[in-house]
Amino acid sequence: MGRIGIVRTCGALLAALFALASTLVTATATATATAAVPAATPSVSNADAVQAASRTMQSSSDVEITLQGASVGGLAPPAITGSGMFNFRAARGLIDLNVAAPGGLTAVHRTLFLPSLVYVKPPSAHAASLPAGKNWIVAELNKIESTSANFPQFVLQEEGLSPLLELQQLIWGAVSVKTIKARDLHGARASGYEVRVDLQKAENTATFFNAPLGLAIKTEINSLGTSGGGAGLGLPQISEKVWVHDGRVVLMSVSPPGAGVGVTTTSFSGYGVRVAVRAPNPGSVVDVTRLTPAAEKESGADVA
C-alpha cells in the first residue's frame, strides 16, 4: 500500500474508533506538577472530592471505563467498554478498549500511557495498514502540533481514554462542589459529589508548568466551541460526578457541556496494584508524524 493510502486508512481508523471518544472530555499530565499546585480556592480545594482526587493521584489502581454516546432521535449507540490499570503517581498505565470487529466479533484496541508518550496498538485487522513490521503508533504528548496536519486530535482522543485527565482537571480546575446521592460500590457506601471544573483554569495551571495537559485542554476547549475569557463569554466548564470511599475515588462520571454530548464513566478498584507499563520494541513502532503527508514530504521517508 502506498504512503497516501496508509494515511487515509489510518485516518479512517482513528475517526471510526474515536467518533464517540472524541466527544468526551480527556488527556494526561505528569504527576510531578500534580502534587505541587494549589488548584482551587481554599474552600473548594479542601472539599472531600478534591482531596480524594489528590490522594488517588498518589496511588495506583485497576480501572474500568464505559464510553456512552449521546442519543440521536431517541436512539443511543452501543456503549464502548474497556479496562486497564494505572500508576497515577508515575503517569503510566494502559487501557484495552473493546471495539467491534468483522463478523460481529470484538477486537482489542490497546493504548499505553507514559509520562510524555502515548502508544497505540490498533486491532490486527487495522494494523495491517501500517508500514511493514509495525503494529504500534506513537505520539509525543508535548508535540501535539506535530500531528495537526492530518490527525489534529490524535493525542486528545487517545488520552481521552485515560482517567488521568479526569482527576487532574478536577484538582486544577474545581470551582464548586455539591453533594449528590451516595451509591453502593464495591460492597461499600460511597459519598457522592458533583464538581464543576473550569477548563480554562486547569489549562492555565498546566501551561504554567509547561505540562502536555495544557495543549490537550486547549484543544478540548476549542472542540467544545467555547471561549476562555472572551468578552461576554463564560469560561468553558464541565461537570464531574465523583463517588468517594475511604478517602479515594471509586467512580467518576464526566460530561462535557451541551445537550446530549455523551458520558464517560470510570470505575477504580484494587488500589495499590502493581503496574508495569513499558514502551514497545522500537522496531515495531511508527511515529504518527510519519503517517501524515506533510511529514513524509519533509523527510522523504517511504513508509509503504
Image (cartoon, grey):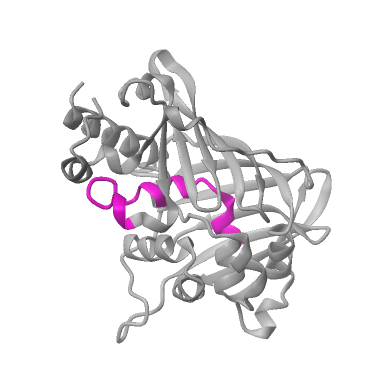
The relative height of residue 256 versus residue 74 in the rendered view (above or below) is below
Check the picture and name the quadrant holding the C terminus: top left
Estimate the x, y position of residue 90 in percent, counting from the top left.
Answer: 65, 53
Q: Which residue is drawn at 83% across and 44% down?
A: 187
Please tell me whether residue 302 is drawn above or below residue 57 in the rendered image. Answer: above
Q: Main secondary structure of the magenta part?
A: helix
Q: In this view, does 47 lie to the left or right of 176?
A: right
Q: Which residue is drawn at 68% across and 56% down?
A: 89
Q: Quadrant of residue 285?
A: top left
Residue closest to the eye, 229 or 286: 286
Q: Can residue 70 be seen in this view?
A: no
Q: Does the magenta stretch include residue 293?
A: no
Residue 167 place in picture, x, y as percent = 61, 60
Tell me where residue 272 appears, x and y as whole percent: 79, 47
Return the x and y of residue 253 as percentages of the image width and height.
58, 54
Residue for point 75% across, 59% down = 244
Total numbered labels placed on residues in the image = 0
Left or right? Give the position of 147 relative to 163: left
Q: In which quarter of the image is residue 56?
A: bottom right
Task: State left or right for residue 43 relative to residue 195.
Answer: right
The N terminus lies in quadrant: top left
Asked if the magenta segment contains residue 165, the reply would be yes
The stretch in magenta equals: 145-167
Q: Residue at x 38, y 41 (%)?
A: 18
209 or 22, nearer to the observer: 209
Q: Can residue 11 be seen in this view?
A: yes
- Relative to 132, say whether 44 is above or below: below
Q: With 196 as the anchor, is 88 left or right in this view?
A: right
Furthest-top residue in this view: 103
